[in-house]
Image (cartoon, helix red, strand yellow):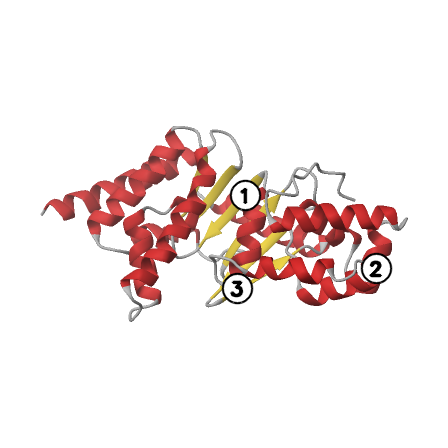
Amino acid sequence: MPGPKKLDPSSSPRALLGAELRHRREGAGLSQGDLGLPLFVSGSFIGQLESGTRRMQMDQAQKLDEILHADGFFVRNCAALKKSKYPDHFAEAAEAEAAAKTIKEYAPLLIPGLLQTEGYARAVFRAYQPTATEGAINDLLAARLERAQLLADPTTPLFWAVLDEAVLRRRVGGPAVMAESLRHILKLAREHRIIVQVLPFGAGAHAAMTGQLKLMSFEDAPPLAYLQSLGTGTLHDEPATVRHHELTYDLVVASALSPELSLALIESVAEDYAHEAQH
């Protein structure tokens, strides 16, 4: 089970709910597993709620108020968790990402959000929503760039990305934007802030051909796996499922170019884009 984590209840609604949940559970003499049973969730999930790595849902809040005699506390405060700058299918994953110790991601089509430049992200959002107002696009962009500040810390989280070669070849925003984007990745890698590998077309069939995969580990909570597809995403915490996705990632890494060869390929493609942009 996750060990105790010192939370600042004033730091976020999730921290407040997590701290209060632990306080009331322990006061009731219940283990995490005991409390999880009537909610049909694992003890690990209760630990993740308490540590702030998972988002409490309204139906869970109602049940917790009933079991812990909380007089509506969890329902009243759960509403604040619904306010997110991210789409519903990604909000919980983004919140978990912010608490992660390590993040490993396989990107089949796009540069991962944490590595995107402003120009690249703007082009992606405009492609997603071609009729959106400029203000709406700017709001999405601001959230994306704020999220990328996770990498401003020099050491945490450890971020390891495997980029499909399609990520390098797809001209998002045009050659100038692509040159800037790939050079940004090179800079982060050469500063030893991230690990990046490329899965080349020549690798053929591989274990993650069906979509994007993100793995997250935490200091005091079980690991999570996040799978995303068009307009939807699923966060998994069941241990056997997470282990399966960890194996998938390991197989992708085994098929990818070494970090050194990957950086050489990224630099070569970036130079081609830069040359094209100049002419």
List the residue tagged with mark 2. Answer: 69
Between 5 and 121, the residue placed more toward the observer is: 5
Nearer-N-terminus badge (2/3): 2
Q: Residue at horizontal 36%, vertical 47%? A: 116
Q: CA distance from mark 2 to mark 3?
A: 29 Å
Number of numbered discs: 3
Q: CA distance from mark 1 to mark 2?
A: 37 Å
List the residue tagged with mark 1. Answer: 103
Q: Residue at horizontal 72%, vertical 45%? A: 19
Between 175 and 47, the residue placed more toward the observer is: 47
- Amino acid at dot 2: His
Q: Residue at horizontal 62%, vertical 43%? A: 10
- Amino acid at dot 1: Ile
Q: Position of residue 125 (x, y in %)?
A: 34, 60
How dense is the environment of label 2, judged by Cα within 10 Å: few (below 14), some, or many (20 and up)? few
**Closer to viewer: mark 2 or mark 3:** 2
Marks 1,2: beta carbons within 8 A: no
- Amino acid at dot 3: Asp
List the residue tagged with mark 3. Answer: 88
SS class, disc 3: helix
Residue 273 left/right relative to 251: left
Q: Position of residue 224 (x, y in %)?
A: 63, 51
